[in-house]
Image: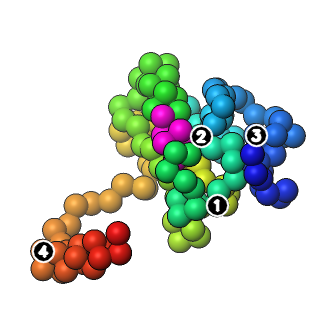
């Protein structure tokens, strides 16, 4: 598996840095986040180093997503939270803190104070339709 010598997640995958491992298979590894936003916050990474969503191959992202589902089910059974977020960030504006593709499993509780939720505000349908057309042209 390829890696970056200064990537903390690559060091965890290699066993050079310890973690509270939840699961490991041929393609992915899941472990507890040591800076949890809520108890049960876990991270899932692909064993190969890919910077973000734009670099990771489809089969690798599929492996991460399947592991995220498995971990989410276990966290749900263990903690019975009121909800669950699966979060994947790309780039500094999205607050990606480690430049190695990863997914967060975050148990949620009513009024837990996390601010990643937003209010629903109706958009301009003409603008949305025009933007959809522009995006489709790049697929």
Marks 1 and 2, the one that precedes in the sequence: 2
Marks 3 and 2, the one that precedes in the sequence: 3
Residue denoted by label 4: 125
Q: Secondary structure at mark 1?
A: loop
Closer to the camera: disc 3 or disc 4?
3
Marks 4 and 1, the one that precedes in the sequence: 1
Image marks 4 and 1: residues in contact by CB distance under 8 Å = no
Residue 96 in the figure: left or right of residue 119: right
Question: How would you rate the neighbour count of disc 3 (Cα within 10 Å): few for under 14, some for 14-19, many for 20 or more?
Answer: many
**Mark linked to residue 51:** 1
Number of numbered discs visible in the structure rendering? 4
Q: Does residue 14 appear anywhere in the picture?
A: yes
Marks 1 and 3, the one that precedes in the sequence: 3
Q: Secondary structure at mark 4?
A: helix
Please tell me which residue is depicted at 52% across the width and 29% down the height of the picture: 71
Q: Does residue 32 appear anywhere in the picture?
A: no
**Mark linked to residue 13:** 3
Image marks 1 and 3: residues in contact by CB distance under 8 Å = no
3D distance between C-alphas at marks 1 and 3: 15 Å
């Amino acid at each position: 598996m390829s890696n970056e010598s200064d990537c903390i997640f690559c060091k965890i995958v290699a066993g050079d840095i310890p973690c509270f491992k939840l699961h490991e298979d041929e393609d992915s590894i899941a472990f507890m986040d040591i800076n949890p936003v809520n108890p049960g916050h876990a991270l899932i990474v692909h064993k190969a180093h890919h910077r973000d969503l734009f670099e990771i191959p489809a089969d690798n992202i599929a492996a991460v997503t399947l592991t995220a589902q498995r971990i989410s089910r276990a966290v749900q059974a263990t903690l019975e939270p009121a909800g669950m977020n699966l979060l994947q960030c790309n780039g500094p504006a999205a607050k990606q803190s480690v430049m190695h593709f990863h997914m967060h499993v975050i148990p949620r509780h009513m009024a837990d104070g996390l601010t990643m939720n937003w209010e629903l505000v109706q958009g301009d349908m003409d603008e949305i339709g025009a933007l959809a057309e522009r995006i489709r042209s790049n697929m």
